[in-house]
Amino acid sequence: RLADNTLPVLGLHEHLRFFVLSQQVGSEKPSREIFDIACEEAADVLGTPVAPSEVLHIGDNFAVDYCGARAAGFSAALMTRPGVKQYQTWLAAPKFDGNEEEEPQQVTSFAEIREKLEGVGAGVSSEGAAFAAPAL
């Protein structure tokens, strides 16, 4: 759905070389497994090993996207768009080193993401979370 329809409309598809969809891999965020699979896919596409710390995950849910990615060792940014509320606020956020002190990096628009992806090889996970290697 997102990979086929939304990303082209937003002009993000041309920056992405692969997709990791939860329904295809049988794992959902914030499970570490989906982040590990995304890292493996990035390595396959790039033809070189990719460490989790070299990947930037961008998503719009603090617990699922930001904390899930950080717990998997990824860099992360939180999409915070004016007027768009958090969903699934009942989910427990995975813990990660420094989670009590860390202030999330934030992006506020798809245009800002597109700007950050210029010139960087990238892929995307389920529900619109972008992965890029190396981290931006």
Image (tube, rainbow, N blue to C red):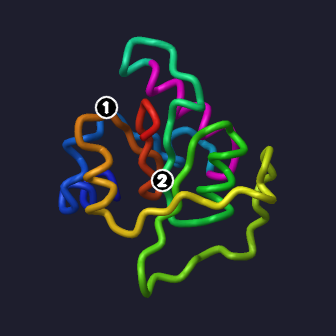
Q: Amino acid at mark 2?
A: Ile
Q: Which mark is residue 58?
A: 2
Q: Is residue 38 above or below residue 80?
A: above
Magenta stretch: helix, strand or loop mostly: helix
Residues packed near mark 2 inside 10 Å, few (<14), some (14 to 19) or many (20 plus): many
> What's the residue at 58%, 66% (across, down)?
61
Q: Are marks 2 and 1 in contact (CB under 8 Å)?
A: no
Among the two numbered marks 2 and 1 on one chain, the one whose residue lies closer to the N terminus: 2
Left or right position of 22 against 131: right
**Residue at the bottom extreme?**
83
> What's the residue at 49%, 62% (across, down)?
106
Q: Which residue is mark 1?
A: 121
Left or right position of 63 against 118: right
**Residue situated in front as seen by the camera: 128 or 72:** 72
Asked if the stretch drawn in magenta spans residue 30, the answer is: yes
> What's the residue at 32%, 48% (across, down)?
116
What is the CA distance from the residue labelled 2 to the residue labelled 1?
15 Å
Q: Is residue 6 above or below residue 38?
A: below
Q: Amino acid at mark 1?
A: Gly
Left or right position of 123 against 74: left
**Residue situated in front as seen by the camera: 99 or 87:** 99
In the picture, which quadrant includes the N terminus? bottom left
Q: Is residue 28 above or below residue 63?
A: above
Q: Position of residue 24 (x, y in %)?
A: 50, 41
Region in magenta? 29-43
Q: Position of residue 125 (x, y in %)?
A: 46, 46
